[in-house]
Amino acid sequence: PWRKTEEMLPAGNAPRETGLAPTTATVQHPIMDLNDAHVVITGASRGIGAALARDFAAAGARPTLVARDADALHALTGEVGGHSLACDLTDRDARADVVARAEALAGPVDVLVNNAGIETGGLMYERSAAELEELVLLNVLAAMELTRQALPGMVERGRGRIVIMSSAAALAALPGMAVYSASKAAMSHFAAG
């Protein structure tokens, strides 16, 4: 069964007041033992993804960090350990075997954190077709595809967790945020399914 995102975070990691990022990790977790768990985190080169990488590593997990920025990934893996996979998740060929590549580096994926995403603001009709496509590819399709890749192994092993990052923007289309809100609503519905 699916569990709320905050239940997936290491113990003591209630979302901050913004609901966007975890707090400092502790080593134990009430739902699953993260010690030596292979955790794949997308969008890990900065922001929430980098904070999650630090927290999961502090909880004893073996992170594999996925993002476009190879230099930032290498710096973060130097800090937290684990592996890095520089990958543009908007590229179909590049994302086609992300889970297989992560498993080749560090073994079966125990936790997949679909965190990668971009936010665009402004009037929808002012966005180019390329901007709209990039947002949907990264915020929606990449998470669905990586989940599709990870689930068969998790089902076969009888264990694993999928974390899908969404946003309060999924609940209401704010002025200038219609496209982003729609992408996060899609993720919320995908996670609920």
Image (spheres, rainbow, N blue to C red):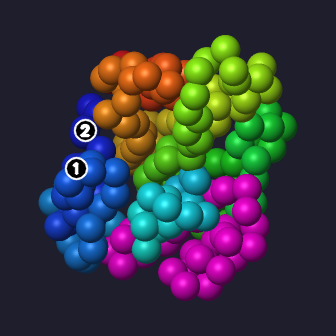
Which span of residues is magenta-colored?
Answer: 55-84
Circle 1 sits on which residue? 7
Residue 181: horizontal and vertical position, in percent? 45, 25
In terms of secondary structure, where does tag 1 sit?
Answer: helix
How many callouts does the rendering have?
A: 2
Residue 187 sits in quarter: top left
Which kind of residue does numbered mark 1 sit on?
Answer: Glu
**Residue 96 in sight from this viewpoint:** no
* Residue 127 visible in rendering: yes
Q: Nearer the viewer, residue 108 or 171?
A: 171
Q: Which label was assigned to residue 3?
A: 2
Q: Relative to residue 72, is residue 126 depicted above or below?
A: above
Does 98 appear above or below 14?
Answer: above
Structural distance between the alpha carbons of marks 1 and 2: 6 Å
- Residue lying at 74% horizontally and 37% vertically, measured from the top left: 90
User: In the figure, 99 relative to 170: above or below?
Assistant: below
- Whether the residues at callouts 1 and 2 have beta carbons within 8 Å, the answer is yes
**Which residue is more in the foreground, 88 or 110?**
88
